[in-house]
Image: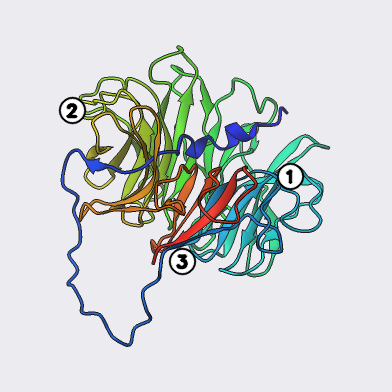
Amino acid sequence: MKRPSLRTLRTHRTLRTLANAVVVAGVVMCSAWPAQAADPDETPAVVPSTQRISVAPDGVTGGNGHSTDPVVSADGRVVAFMSSATNLGPGTDVRNSVYYRTGPGEPLQRVVVPGETTSTPQLSESGRYLTFGSYSTATVTSSVHVMDLSTGTIERLTPAMDDGYQLSYGIAPVSAGGRYVAFVARYAADPQGAFPCRVMLLDRKTREVRRVSREPDGSKTYYRCEQVAMSADGRKVAYLEGYTGPGTGDQGDILVYDRRSGRTVHADATHDGAPAGTSASAPVLSGDGSKVGFNSAATNLVPEADTNSGVNAFVRDLRTGELRRYDGHAPTDLTLLSDLSVDGSKLLLNTADANRTSLGLILRDLCTGNEELLSPGQDGKPVTVGDAALSGDESTVVFESYHPGLVPEDTNLIGDVFARVVR
């Protein structure tokens, strides 16, 4: 089996190097909470600050290899990421490893599967369960594991499946309580070949495995399904269904499967039923499963004219079916969605101007229109970041960046993982 490249494994959240924006259409339904007077006895408000997480045990020295793919728990305390650095902890004997910390100020810990590299971390909302993939160069095999961070135990998933399929590499999101895990399965005899890949859902309590992705109708050949996301309760699973075909046009759809109803929603369907002009990518689900977001350069998904001729962020309300595009401040700005808040009322966005110059990472509140810059440099100006994730309580954002201007001690000029505490 050919080993998947890191670029392939990370396509679920690619192109996230941009920020700032304005809603182009529609009004978001928002809950109205009464304003409350400040309590003089309350703890003083948090002063926003950025900290580099991918550091050696001395707490200062940066990693000697790139750190990527950060994820965060709902309360912002637990952070995990992947790194090729060998100086973040003792005993690093493989090329890539997943690291995690269980709280601010706690030391980094490395996930160890003897003789195997580890990658593609995903955290449950509770922060207790960590899923990750592993790869053995000796046996040329890949696996998915679930780690209980409260006990340190690691379970290698070996779900039984029919038709000659087996669990394969890729992102494996896990529900808040650790019961449900979504994963990719491939044909065992030809894991990289022409057989359709499948997205599956494992119930770790009952051991039931059910198919999430659609049965092929014979009109397409499926070759991508590594981009997978899940709601906190494990009810809904979003994924990219990619196809072989012409070099241009729609080669992939974003689909959302509902475990309870068995219904599948085509999230990037156009407003008039015509084929989308191009593929969508990078699906994300709100924690409550009410909304799904994705990125697409298609110009015909919504009726409003697209003025930037590039990638935009889209969000579909799974309750009403309404799809909206979210544009930048300038008509030519590009917008990319990295994450959604629990109820989908806030967007974690990167944007760039017409010259593809990054404007930083921002959190946009669709109810108030407010925007908050989450990647300011030491001079207060926006800094370019890559993959990013928002905690459920919106207190913390984690992201990767190569930029040396985020913290004073960052002089290694390679990719690091940062956490910014905003409230």
Q: Is residue 107 visible?
A: yes
For residue 423, what is the image quadrant? bottom left
Cα–Cα gap, marks 1 and 3: 28 Å
Can you identify the residue that label 3 sits on? Answer: 75
Coordinates of residue 140 in the picture (x, y in percent): 77, 34
Residue at the spot 75% in from the left edge and 55% down from the top edge: 112
**Front-most of 85 and 94?**
85
Q: Residues within 10 Å of mark 1 (few under 14, many from 20)?
A: many
**Front-most of 9 and 81?**
81
Q: What is the secondary structure assignment of the residue under circle 2?
A: loop
Q: Earlier in the sequence, mark 1 or mark 2?
A: 1
Q: What is the secondary structure assignment of the residue under circle 1?
A: strand
**Front-most of 195 and 286?**
286
Can you identify the residue that label 1 sits on? Answer: 117
Q: Is residue 10 above or below residue 342?
A: above
Can you identify the residue that label 2 sits on? Answer: 303
Give the amino acid at mark 3: Asp
Q: What is the secondary structure assignment of the residue under circle 3?
A: loop
Q: Earlier in the sequence, mark 3 or mark 2?
A: 3
